[in-house]
Amino acid sequence: MKPRVYRLFRTVSAAPRSRRTIAIMTLIAAMISALAISRVRARHEVVSLGYELSRANQEVRALREASRRLEVERATLTSPARIHTLAAAMGMVPAPADAIRVVRPAPGVAAAP
C-alpha cells in the first residue's frame, strides 16, 4: 500500500470517540426499538380486547333474546284461559263453593307461607 492509503486505515486518537458515538447511537436505536415494540404490543392488546368485548356483547344480546323468548313462552303456558281450556278438555270442572273447606293448622304448628 502507498503511504497515503495507509493513513486512512491507521488508528489514531479519534477512534475511541467514534466507537463511543456508535455505542450511543446503537443504544438510542435499541431504546427506540423497544418503545416501538411496546407500543405495538399495547395496541395489539387494545384491539384484542375490543374483539373480546364485541363477542361478549353479542353473547349478552343472544342471552337477552333467549330470556325474552322464555318469558313469552312462560306467560303463554301459564295463561289462565289456556289452563281453563286444558282443564275443561280433561273433564275438570271448578269445585262448588260448599265443597271447599278451610283447614286450620293445629296449635303449635306454624302455618305455611
Image: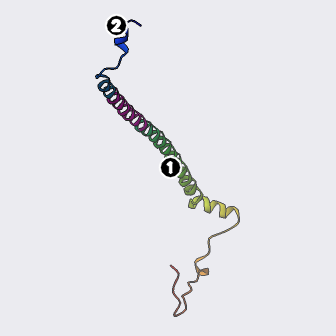
Name the spot of residue 79 as percent of width and height, x first: 56, 59
Q: Which dot marks residue 33? A: none
Q: Which dot marks residue 4? A: 2
Separation (CA) of disc 2 from disc 1: 86 Å
Please, is residue 75 above or below residue 109 in the view?
A: above
The quadrant in which residue 87 appears is: bottom right
Residue located 56% across and 61% down the image: 80
- Give SS at disc 1: helix
Instruction: Return the residue nearer the eye: 51 or 75.
Output: 51
Q: Nearer the viewer, mark 2 or mark 1?
A: 2
Please, is residue 4 above or below residue 84 in the view?
A: above
Residue located 66% across and 61% down the image: 86
- Dot 1 corresponds to which residue? 64
Instruction: Return the residue nearer the eye: 45 or 99.
Output: 45
Name the N-terminal-most of marks 2 and 1: 2
Residue extending furthest toward the bottom: 107
Residue located 71% across and 64% down the image: 90
